[in-house]
Image (cartoon, rainbow, N blue to C red):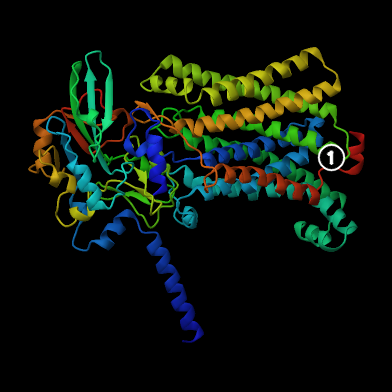
Amino acid sequence: MNRREFLKKGCLLASSSLLAGGLSGDGWTKTIFKDYDPAKHFYGMGIDINKCIGCGRCMQACKTENDVPAEPYFFRTWVERYLIRTDKSVTVRTISLTRDDPAEFSVEKEMLRSFFVPKLCNQCDHPPCVQVCPVIATFKTPDGVTLVDEKRCIGCRYCIQACPYGARYLHPVTRVADKCTFCYHRLVKGLLPVCVEVCPKQARLFGDMKSFASPLGRFTRIHKMHVLKPSLNTDPKVYYANLDGEVN
Amino acid sequence: MEAAHNFKELSQQVIGFIYPNEIEIHWSILIVVYPYITGLVAGAFILASLVKVFNVKELQPTYRLALLTALAFLLIAPLPLQLHLGRPERSYEMFMTPNPASAMAMFGFVYLWYLMVVLLLEIWFEYRRDMIVWAGESTGLKKWTLKILSLFSTDISEKAVAFDKKTVKVITIIGIPSAFLLHGYVGFIFGSVKANPWWSSVMMPVVFLFSAIVSGIAIVMLLYMIIIPLRGGKIDMKCLDKTASFLFYAVIVDFSIEALDFIHRLYESEESIKILSQLVSTKLFMSLVILQILLGMILPLVVMASIKILKFQEDLRKLLYFVCALLIQLGIFSTRWNVVIGGQLFSKSFRGLTTYKMELMGIEGLLVALVVLILPFFILAVLLKLLPPWKKEELAEG
């Protein structure tokens, strides 16, 4: 290789690596999944509070499917149990996967109402995490899912601070931010998020918000909908039916 | 896993309910140190600018010291951030693919602007003539270091020196808004997090700015009172009284703004008020009520006011100024603690409080934080050796 060729190839290599480093979120999905067109979808999830029985299968399945650390301090999805007493006092607990706490299932005399609330990343349409990420490691895909590029994230944890829903954690092994992806690796193959698939009560519904006929489309037509912390203007795409005003 | 074991211990100390992922405090003592350090930089620079732009002649003896202090701390400012990253080897991404919408992404640019365009330039022009003269007087390594630092310039004609002076003034004028930007920006990083009611406030950059001015003036005052006697000089009381005077007014403004913020929050009493009140009266009682407000603000204010009214004699004044400046440092450090750590001690569900257990040895532990805090003083010692702020005759005059 003469000098001219060497310089030419060197420049090419440098510019192509710069290009690869600067890929947008759109480019990222297209690079990885050849047959999938993200522009044709726009995903959301529906959760019916009245149907959830707090079995925690979604939590367990999510941990297994997504290699979430087993310890109970890292969750992509979790279920909260609300207990409201007659004196209006409220107790909230996260369902335990090991069921080592009998108090969790006790029914109290003064109980006014009690229910379960499955939680996960709200896949906001105006995600504060994407806004604050200094290196564009967190980005929104065209199909409406917020993802983290674990190869670019620097672990500054600004996104964790910015998330109003506590949906993010720092992965103890990779040392980068991690969160629910709506099981994006399954979506691109036409499968459902694993929490939706394993729910025995169909308390979780998933679908394309562009489609009128999808289960989610029907769900949003027949129920009154609510989202978490609407005042923050994050426009969540996780919709709750029969949500209690106490939940935040 | 050790972390998991710690979390288990922490989870037993949780009061009420927190989201399960909230058990870990993500911004640790290092992130407390970072705004504390940049605050000192901005504050010291503002003090220096009082001499050049606002012509406060009495403060001249602190001018060069303030500049060098600002530089020493600024050089260390990125270190706690770098150490705190989960993947520190990727920090260059901040420059390669910065997110223009992210306040944090702008750090590198604000920092470089302040370091290269403001501080280094101002110090260079301020010292250029002296560096040439000193290089001529010394030998060996020192001679060459000074020659390199002066970028081999040799012109010490009256015209050139006059140009230096004029340039310093222009840079200082650019420097004041830049110092405001540097620290106001740090406040914005916190103030713009709408998910966190303890942080989310339009007042945050302003509070940061004035607390920065307070801490910067106080640190220069402390250093002045320590270094001058060490160098066998006499403390210039006119300078000290004037510095203390500015410190007094800065604390009053800072106190008023913070009081306004508190009153506003209490009066509006939004959704988060219950949990924030609980936070202040339990977890933050010591660091906020006792250290920040009582010892760090009210006590120094009372002492400095009584100095103004009662006109104590010189030695007592020196002692009291020294104690006040120390207390103020303690108070401002607590302010940073209360913002950074305090903002993470309550759940975003507004239903519970968690605990911060500081590590001792780890990379985000107390020891590393202390090293980061002490390093600037070593840098300052080198800078003072190389670029003495006072001439021999100035030291003797006092």
Q: Position of residue A159 (x, y in %)?
A: 39, 43
Q: Quadrant of residue A115?
A: top left
Q: Residue at x 80, y 39 (%)?
A: B227
| Of A154 and A116, the residue lying toward us | A116
Q: Seen in the image, is B171 located left or right of residue A150?
A: right
Q: Chain of mark 1?
A: B
Q: As rendered, which of A143 and B235 lies closer to the eye?
A: B235
Q: Amino acid at mark 1?
A: Leu
Residue at screen point 27% across, 27% down: A92
Name the spot of residue B331 as percent of width and height, x first: 62, 27
Q: Nearer the viewer, residue A88 or B106?
A: A88
Q: Residue at x 47, y 20 (%)?
A: B281
Q: Residue furthest bottom?
A: A2
Residue under numbered circle 1: B230
**Circle 1 Cα neighbour tier, 10 Å, few/some/many (<14 / 14–19 / ≥20):** few
Decide if residue A182 is in sight here. no
State the image coordinates of residue B77 (x, y, percent, origin top left).
Answer: 60, 45
Whether residue A56 is visible: yes
| Quarter of the C terminus of chain A within the rendering | top left
User: Image height check: is B132 above or below B281?
Assistant: below
Residue B343 in the image: state x and y as whole percent.
45, 31
* Residue B266, picture quadrant: top left
Number of marks drawn: 1
Q: Secondary structure at mark 1?
A: helix
